[in-house]
Image: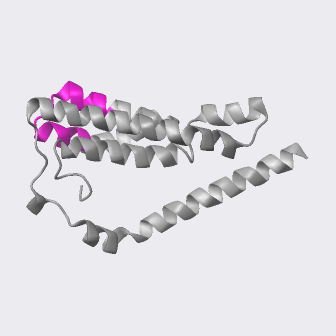
Amino acid sequence: MALAGHTTGGPAKVAVIASGFMGSINGSSVANTVTTGSFTIPLMKSIGYRKDFAGAVEAAASTGGQILPPVMGAAAFVMAEFLEIPYIKIAAAAAIPAIIYYIAVGTMVHLEACKYGLKGLPKEQLPKLIEVLKERGHLIIRLAADCLHSFRHRLQSLFIFSS
């Protein structure tokens, strides 16, 4: 919320960002929607988004997790196995299209907010970004370490099976 909650249509932009981060580590659209949607859909509705649009934003943002590295969806592993190329190459090829996908979803959220005059939350109601990073910034390090460990483990398993 500290990152984009104050901008035009802020809660919906936060939903897109949250779903992107969550999708990047679980790769499941349904799990992502259930996990982040239980918080973000009511928040979007509270500032004036229609309930169908709020649900659509969450579903679209959560679906993007299947193409967002590092974990991606199960299809990425099938592609790597079927094409006999390293998973890391599949993930690298998916990075730019996934970022473009999330930019497009965020743009639609912004345009909808502008169309209906939806403002973000007042800055007084939001935590300060620097305070959030001081309190919980260490969690990003753990996430990065998990991603690196996952890639290293997958690469090692690919080399073991290809020998």
Residue 18 image position (x, y, % from top left): 35, 48
Q: From what the image shows, is residue 134 above or below residue 94?
A: below
Q: Is residue 65 visible to the viewer in this orientation of the structure?
A: no
Residue 93: quadrant of the picture: top right
Q: Which residues are magenta?
A: 40-58
Q: Position of residue 95 (x, y in %)?
A: 54, 42
Tell me if 20 is positioned left or right of 71 in this view: left
Depth order, front residue of 120/139: 120
Vertical comparison of 153 with 38: above or below: below
Q: Position of residue 79 (x, y in %)?
A: 69, 31
Q: What is the tally of numbered marks visible in this picture?
A: 0
Task: Determine the image quadrant of residue 50.
Answer: top left
**Image location (x, y in percent) of residue 110:** 22, 37
8 or 84, nearer to the observer: 8
Say how the picture is coloured. Answer: one colour
For residue 44: magenta? yes
At a point 50% along the width and 66% down the height, the residue shown is 142
Q: Above or below — where is 148 with respect to 154?
A: below
Instruction: Name the residue at 55% across, 45% down.
Output: 69
Principal SS element in the magenta part? helix
Residue 12 inside the magenta-drawn segment: no
39 relative to 49 in the view: left or right: right
Instruction: Tell me which residue sits at (50%, 35%) in the image.
Output: 97
